[in-house]
Amino acid sequence: MPSVSHQCVFQSLWKELSLRGHEVTVITPNPLRDPSLTNLTEIDVSYMYEIMQRHGFQYFMSKELPVHTKIRRIFNLNYELAEAIFKNEKLLQIYNGSTVNFDLIIAQTYVSPILYTLSAKLNVPIIGISSMGGWIGSHIAMGNPNIAALYSEMFLHYNGIMTFYERLSSTIYNLWVRYFLTFEALPKGDQIARKYLGNGIPYLGRRGKKS
């Protein structure tokens, strides 16, 4: 996600991994450009800021807009961001015939899982880390209990003990997200991933095996 507040959460992580001797490759819109980190390769995707500004991210996140409108717009933004990353020449070299072997992918968990498909393409495990709490779609994917009538969600502005109306709204939103992911967002994301990574990857909406 091209936002400093999102990226700063992970910068200390990839810096420390590099300092501890791990060979780290990072795809980021906010590269550190620290010459002392000799084990760190940064793929600069700062051009994604222009995409986010064009979509008006800071405006459509207004509390006045209905939550389902925000989610649709966030996903529309993420479809274009994912394609911009997949097209990156340095990343193309990695996932198309690269001789470099990776042991692990660490990815930001926000809303769209499109880039998780790199895990299947490179045949390595993936760890998701959220910079701002867990979205309901992530909980659904992992099978986490998520009782909408008891607990609010990160994109809803309810706090503490909810009223009956808030519980009802939260439950309806939960059901809508399941519909939206199943029939719109995941099929669209899967289509984008296959456009670049080929058809050898599993369907984006398929849950992995639990260890």
Image (tube, helix red, strand yellow):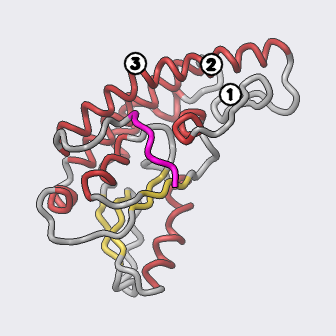
Q: Which residues are magenta?
A: 205-211
Between 184 and 142, the residue placed more toward the observer is 142
Residue type marked 2: Tyr
Q: Nearer the viewer, mark 2 or mark 1?
A: 2
Q: Is residue 202 magenta?
A: no
User: Residue 62: where, in percent of width, then height?
Assistant: 60, 27
User: Residue 71: where, in percent of width, then height?
Assistant: 51, 26
Q: Are marks 2 and 1 in contact (CB under 8 Å)?
A: yes
Q: Nearer the viewer, mark 3 or mark 2?
A: 3
Q: Quadrant of residue 112?
A: top left
Gap in angstroms between the C-alphas marked 2 and 1? 9 Å
Q: Secondary structure at mark 1?
A: loop
Gap in angstroms between the C-alphas marked 1 and 3? 22 Å
Q: What label does residue 173 carry, if any? A: 2
Q: Earlier in the sequence, mark 2 or mark 1?
A: 1
Residue located at (18% from left, 39% from top): 199
Residue type marked 3: Phe
Q: Earlier in the sequence, mark 3 or mark 2?
A: 2
Residue type marked 1: Leu
Q: Are marks 1 and 3 in contact (CB under 8 Å)?
A: no
**Left or right position of 157 against 135:** right
Residue located at (43% from left, 80% from top): 18
In the orientation shown, which residue stands out farthest toward the left?
A: 97
Residue at image mark 3: 183
Q: Residues within 10 Å of mark 3 (few under 14, many from 20)?
A: few
**Left or right position of 197 against 119:** left
Q: Residues within 10 Å of mark 2 (few under 14, many from 20)?
A: some
